[in-house]
Amino acid sequence: MTSPTASLVIVSYNGWEELQRCLESVFQDDAPPAEVIVVDNASSDGSPLRIRQHFPQVILIEAPENLGFAAGCNLGAAHARGNYLAFLNPDTIVARGWLRALLDALENDPSAGLATSKILLLDQPNRLNTCGNQIHLTGITLCRGINHPAHSFDRLEPVNAVSGAAFMIRSDLFHRLGGFDEDLFLYMEDADLSLRARLAGYRCLYAPGSQVYHDYRLSFGPRKTFYQERNRYAMLLKAFRWRTLFLLAPALLLAEAITWGFTLLYEPARLGNKLEAYRWLWRNRRRLLDRRRSAQKLRRVPDRPLLLRSTAWLDFRQAVDGLLPRLAEAIFNPLFGLHKLLLGVVVWW
């Protein structure tokens, strides 16, 4: 049997109404994916039965437990036959031609391994959610172009990272990278996969012709700080050489001051999340070193271009608004900018 061109993987957990809306838009496209795989992460809302009833053409995989986003995507990818893998959040609606635009971006550029969509806000379709993601020097990852007008960011161009809400990757590259890092469970898996792909010599592209609407709302769950802090350090430890990490220490200390300050001011009841992230990193250091060795074996790119393409600007107002984040931007961003300039002088490996 010949392989389909593109396989679409959607991971769902207790979100039947959103998933139904998403699948309807996928199948209404002029050129839908050759196969659609839904991984249900042990939902309790009857999603599997409803998928079978309403979308019999979907390949349904029922996970025995909530595996998280990363492991769920890997499970779906293991059953996919496509030359390309597309991943889509269930709380999205795709515009016609979204898949073809991602395919074109990758087929026309052999140096590109991943391509991501122009993602707009579902409840404000004239505003952007993200046009690829920005990875900061310190690993903090933010939406690129959020709240800008929908018509902006209209060029095909390289980006630091794809958005896990809607992107495509070459299937052979995905498997060579080992897929998503399942230890990350939730948050920043897309940035980690993107950085490892770039380390292996592949570019991440933003394809504005691929448009997707995302039901995005910034929220801070009880474990979000733990996942984000743990995952950004795990990502940096896998990607950069030890001497680069040593030189990044001043920026990382600044980021520590910022994240501790944010948690104290806005999430004081969740201070333990930061400490738990440190504990996890220490207790799992051997596993992290194994993952680091795997990533470094695929290295084709030195640290310098990875650092130079990172951003030194933190948009504090993506998290909170008001006078305080504006002051933080005025104080911290020049320091990050200066540190990046110094890294550009010193880091030639």
Image: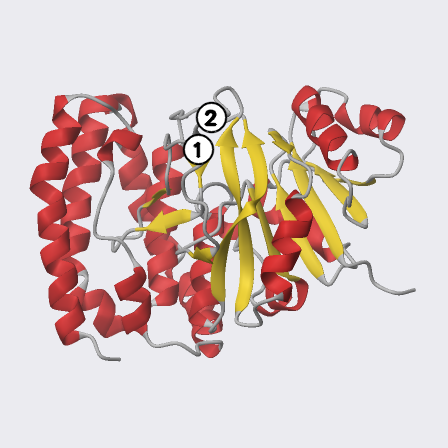
Q: CA distance from mark 2 to mark 1?
A: 7 Å
> At numbered mark 2, what does the secondary structure look like: helix, strand or loop?
loop
Does residue 157 appear anywhere in the picture? yes
Q: Residue at x 81, y 50 (%)?
A: 34
Give the camera-side residue of 69 and 102: 102
> Where in the figure is residue 327, as x and y percent of width and height?
9, 31
Q: Secondary structure at mark 1?
A: strand
Q: Quadrant of the C terminus?
A: bottom left
Q: Nearer the viewer, residue 11 or 323?
A: 323
Q: In the drawing, what numbered circle is on residue 202?
A: none
Residue that numbered label 1 is attached to: 128
Q: Amino acid at mark 2?
A: Asn
Question: How far across and how far down the image is residue 170, in percent?
Answer: 63, 63
Left or right of residue 125: residue 248: left
Left or right: residue 272 versus residue 154 is left
Q: Label 1 amino acid? A: Leu
- Disc sitting over residue 126 in the figure: 2
**Looking at the picture, does residue 231 appear above or below residue 125?**
below
